[in-house]
Each structure stands twice: as structure tokens, then as C-alpha cells.
Amino acid sequence: MRARAERAVTIAAGSFRMGTEDRDRNPGDGESPVRSVDLPAFRIDPTCVTNAEFAAFVDETGYVTEAEEFGWSFVFASLLEKELRRASRKPPGTPWWRAVEGARWDQPEGPGSTVAERADHPVVHVSLRDAEAFAQWCGMRLPREAEWEKAARGGLDQARYAWGDELTPGGEHRCNIWQGAFPVRNTLEDGYLATAPVRSFPPNSFGLYEVAGNVWEWCSDPWTTGQASSMTGDVRVMRGGSYLCHDSYCNRYRVAARSATAAEDASGNKGFRLAVDV
């Protein structure tokens, strides 16, 4: 784990065109305008941090996540047993979530659940503080938003997705997102209801996996561009979308898409990958 930075993908110094004027962009998210951004060389993880990797960190340091301190975290309702789903608080405006007592990184659906068979899945229920603590442990940091987008684009200029402009080229699924009618029916055409193991889908041209869908990824940048009127305090940028994204309400698996979230938020569809200076 301490050699993690050496295994990260090197992204060469240079400029790229960040943002989009895509017709499907979310105007309130600050995706536009397209602008040229010049970055020094950096390295970035090819995958998100996994449950096994986070477990090694916890075993060595005794770290306690914010979800553990709070005593609960948000879980997608369809992943819960019927009784627990009914007993857990439903947040206003997003009825597909439940506030589950005891949900945390190693009990992702609450007490009785486990990550024993999900060692290679991205760790979830991690807040900004949790991600930064892991990063410090292995001598890395969270990526800056511009770094994340440059790496996720894989050298493609203004493509809609990390692999091109078609969502399913040749009928092939390239990411773990929702298919069907959200949130009531998922046809599972990509094979997954919740998280997929890292490296489940082809990498982009830079060798990065799952930069679209699967889990939202923390960036270090404060949210300063775009609307987040319901949030106060420390609000940060997240990138990439998750297994819950669907074109009907959240097409943020596009490579220029972005979202805002509170720094302490640690729900079941948020993870992270790390970066480091060269």
C-alpha cells in the first residue's frame, strides 16, 4: 500500500479542453464553458480504492470513519431487506434512499451485511475526511477536479464519455449505471444492481477504470461554480456518477459532468481514487 503512488498512472503535463457545451449538460452544475486548462504532470490511481485496501488501512491505524461516528449512513432502498427498508428513515425528495442505522464501509447495507465477498469492490460510505485520511496514510492526495477530468478523458477531446460519444458502442456496456425505469426497475443489462468490482469494464486510453458510473469519486476542490443552494458548510466536487445514475434524472456519467456534496456525506454510492504529484 505504501508503494501505491509508484503504481499510479502517469498523466503527462500539458493542456486539455475542460468542460462541455453538450446539449445534455446540466446548466446548474457549472459544466460550461469549455476552457483550456494547463496542468503539470501527475499520477492517478487506475482504480478506486477497494474494500480490501481500506481494510488494510483500518487494521493498521484503527481509523474510525465518520459514518461509524454518526451511527448511520444512506443506503439505496432496493438493496435492503423489506423490514429494514420500512423501518429506516426516508429522506425528503429522494425516496430511493434510506438512512440505515449501523451502515458503514464494512457493513454497507447495515448490521448483518459484510464486504467479505466484495474485497475488490470500491469502498463506499466514506466521507471527504475518511478519503483524506487514507490518502495521507499512503502518501498521496485526492485528485483536483481538473486532474480528474483530464485523466478520465483519456486523451479524447470533448468526447461525451470516457470512451467516445456513444453510450453503448456496438451494444457493449462500458459502465455500471442504471438501466430500466429508475428507481423501480433495473434490468441489470450491465450485470450489476449496486457496485461492481474494479476493472469490471474496459479502461480508457490512459488505463483508468470505471471513471463513469459505479461510484461517485471525491475531488479536493470546493464547489464554487454551479448551484448547490440546499447545501451549506464545506461542499466539495464529486465526479464520475454512480450505479444509480440514469438518463431520466442524472446523466452525470458523462465525462464533463460534476456534482456537489457535503464533505461529511458518506453514502453507499461514494468512493474515491487518489493522485500524487510527479
Image (cartoon, rainbow, N blue to C red):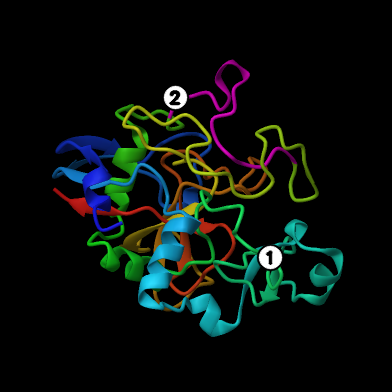
Residue 8 in the image, given as x and y percentages of width and height: 27, 44
The image quadrant that residue 40 belongs to is: top left
Helix, strand or loop at disc 1? loop
Q: Could you say which disc has been placed on residue 164 in the image?
A: 2
In the rendered view, tell whether residue 91 sits above or below residue 206: below
Quadrant, the N terminus: bottom left
Give the CA distance from mark 2 to mark 1. 37 Å
Bounds of the magenta segment: 163-180
Q: Residue at x 55, y 83 (%)?
A: 70
Q: Residue at x 74, y 47 (%)?
A: 182
Tell me if 171 is positioned left or right of 83 in this view. left
Which comes sooner in the sequence, label 2 or label 1? 1
Q: Residue at x 76, y 56 (%)?
A: 78
Q: Residue at x 46, y 61 (%)?
A: 260
Tell me if 160 is positioned left or right of 172 in this view. left
Sort mark 2 into few (<14), some (14-19) or many (20+) by Cα contacts within 10 Å.
some
Task: State the residue lying farthest toward the top.
Answer: 170
